[in-house]
Image (spheres, grey):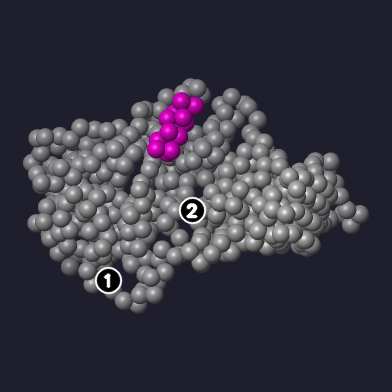
């Protein structure tokens, strides 16, 4: 028996942890523009979504996750028996290549396409060919990765046609109509659905081809936790319009910098160039990771804050403009909540808070705006159990980000005080960036969680906070209270020089 030999394998770039250590940054300061994934997971990706799956994690799913497959079938208008689940669409790329092209030939449309096809061909002992008409397997990446184009589907095909629609939602296309003609359509939850880490993909095919796929698959290559996340995601309306709008905005801004991205039908942009790696190398010290190809540079589209960071770094490198202060990036995940925070202390009052808890989202908006900060707070929590966990964790997350942003608290005024009226209510707040967590609060009437929210902030930000607020309307009292804290924070955060405002020399 001959010994197996190693073949070329798919190459992953370094992890955030490895890059951060190399660059002297924190792992959370690394922003990936190289994976074509959204900036945030879907709102449905929260602990409660997988709670039932965890309760049954000791058991197998005996029906190949029939509920999830039925939801997929319903979405595409096919029968349950035409849907296969796999560990991402990559599992099907490898499996189908082995099924239909073992020792044969594989072609891709366009020829410059997703590298996994080449690796799958090597695993199957197949060779790559440019002759689509004679290939045993033809992969049409539609829209195409890495170029972003929307290729035509060739008609003169002898072998198995596979339509890889990983980015189809961004183009508004669906190749399911080709299934009846014998094609296999591949989809993934990694891109538009934002579940890359869950590793869930699916194949749509005729009943006969689906039965063939099932006969060659591992019995359950998708975990029950991943299936639960995918089911929750597909049950929610999918809206990629914001990312598409961002793609066009970034494309225009890149054009202004003298770069010329191709028109894209995906969630990324491709810029033809000969020196793509030089851009990767130049932007890496900023914590920005891009993807270089022989033919050009690929840039994933994230949200506006991340995209602005990329554009600022490019302007700095290409035009010599100053680099704005970066946002402090912080994440907090518990069994009840999942929250992300991006904070810039010396900001312009650009604030967006969206966690699903409307009233206290508004209160944090007031605090950050009147504090002169830039803040983006997003996430979800177990509101079905009440607002306690979410409100507490929102302000703990904000406090943790604030503590990190304050660092050694050098050169700050340290103290701040403010009085704010709100109709019949009056709030008085005094803050000390002391490095010691203490909250003395007298808020009456409290709408429910105002005092606890501020106490959570003081604990995690390590500040001393005194607040007195009185009035008749609980909403007015709370709003005056959070505005007063924000305005007191604005004073305390004023830059006064290079010293610590303490006779001890440190806080």
Q: Position of residue 56 (x, y in %)?
A: 35, 75
Determine the secondary structure under disc 1: loop
- Indicate left or right for 468 with 258 as reference: right
Disc 1 marks which residue? Answer: 61
Query: Is the N terminus in the top left, top right, bottom left or bottom right quadrant?
Result: bottom left
Q: In the current view of this chain or complex, which residue is farthest to the bottom?
A: 58
What distance separates the C-alpha of mark 2 from that of mark 1?
32 Å
Determine the secondary structure under disc 2: loop
The mark total stands at 2
Residue displayed at 31% across by 76% down: 59
Labelled disc at residue 15? 2
Residue displayed at 63% across by 27% down: 321
Name the one closer to the observer, 101 or 81.
81
Which badge, 2 or 1, is on the more N-terminal residue? 2
Q: Position of residue 100 (x, y in %)?
A: 13, 52
Q: Main secondary structure of the magenta part?
A: helix
Looking at the rendered image, the disc whose residue lies closer to the viewer, 2 or 1, is 1
Asked if the stretch drawn in magenta spans residue 248, the answer is: yes
Above or below 417: residue 243: above
Name the one closer to the observer, 123 or 112.
112
Q: Position of residue 365 (x, y in %)?
A: 63, 46
Name the one closer to the observer, 312 or 117.
312
* Image quarter of residue 215: bottom left
Above or below 216: residue 349: above
Asked if the stretch drawn in magenta spans residue 140, the answer is: no
Residue displayed at 16% across by 52% down: 78
Q: Position of residue 309 (x, y in %)?
A: 56, 37
Q: Which residues are magenta?
A: 241-254
Category of crowding for the residue at label 2, using alpha-carbon neighbours closer than 10 angstroms: few (below 14), some (14–19), many (at least 20): few
């Amino acid at each position: 028996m001959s010994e197996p030999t190693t073949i070329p394998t798919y190459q992953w770039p370094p992890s955030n942890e490895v890059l951060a250590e190399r660059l002297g940054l924190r792992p959370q300061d690394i922003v990936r523009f190289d994976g074509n994934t959204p900036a945030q997971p879907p709102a449905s990706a929260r602990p409660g979504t997988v709670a039932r799956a965890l309760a049954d994690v000791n058991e197998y799913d005996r029906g190949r996750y029939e509920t999830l497959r039925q939801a997929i079938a319903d979405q595409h208008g096919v029968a349950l028996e035409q849907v296969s689940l796999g560990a991402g669409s990559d599992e099907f790329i490898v499996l189908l290549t082995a099924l239909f092209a073992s020792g044969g030939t594989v072609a891709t449309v366009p020829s410059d396409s997703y590298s996994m096809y080449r690796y799958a061909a090597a695993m199957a002992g197949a060779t790559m060919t440019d002759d689509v008409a004679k290939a045993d397997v033809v992969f049409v990446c539609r829209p195409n990765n890495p170029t972003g184009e929307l290729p035509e589907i060739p008609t003169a095909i002898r072998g198995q046609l596979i339509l890889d629609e990983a980015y189809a939602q961004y183009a508004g296309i669906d190749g399911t109509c080709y299934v009846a003609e014998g094609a296999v359509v591949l989809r993934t939850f990694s891109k538009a659905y934002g579940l890359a880490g869950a590793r869930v993909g699916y194949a749509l095919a005729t009943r006969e081809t689906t039965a063939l796929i099932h006969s060659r698959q591992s019995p359950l290559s998708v975990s029950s936790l991943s299936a639960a996340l995918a089911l929750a995601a597909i049950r929610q309306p999918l809206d990629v319009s914001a990312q598409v709008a961002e793609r066009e905005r970034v494309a225009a801004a890149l054009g202004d910098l003298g770069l010329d991205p191709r028109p894209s039908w995906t969630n990324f942009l491709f810029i033809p160039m000969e020196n793509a790696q030089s851009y990767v190398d130049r932007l890496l010290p900023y914590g920005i990771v891009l993807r270089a190809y022989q033919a050009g540079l690929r840039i994933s589209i994230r949200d506006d804050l991340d995209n602005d960071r990329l554009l600022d770094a490019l302007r700095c490198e290409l035009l010599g403009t100053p680099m704005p202060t970066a946002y402090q990036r912080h994440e907090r995940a518990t069994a009840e909540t999942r929250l992300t925070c991006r904070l810039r202390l010396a900001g312009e009052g650009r604030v967006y808070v969206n966690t699903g808890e409307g009233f206290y989202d508004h209160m944090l908006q007031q605090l950050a705006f009147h504090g002169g900060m830039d803040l983006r707070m997003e996430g979800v929590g177990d509101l079905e159990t009440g607002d306690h966990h979410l409100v507490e964790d929102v302000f703990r997350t904000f406090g943790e980000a604030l503590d990190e942003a304050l660092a050694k608290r050098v050169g700050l005024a340290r103290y701040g005080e403010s009085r704010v009226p709100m109709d019949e209510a009056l709030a008085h707040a005094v803050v000390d960036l002391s490095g010691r967590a203490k909250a003395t609060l007298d808020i009456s009437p409290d709408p429910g969680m105002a005092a606890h929210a501020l106490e959570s902030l003081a604990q995690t930000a390590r500040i001393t906070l005194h607040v007195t607020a009185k009035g008749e309307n609980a909403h007015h009292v709370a709003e005056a209270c959070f505005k007063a804290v924000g305005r007191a924070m604005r004073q305390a955060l004023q830059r006064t020089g290079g010293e610590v405002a303490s006779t001890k020399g440190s806080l």
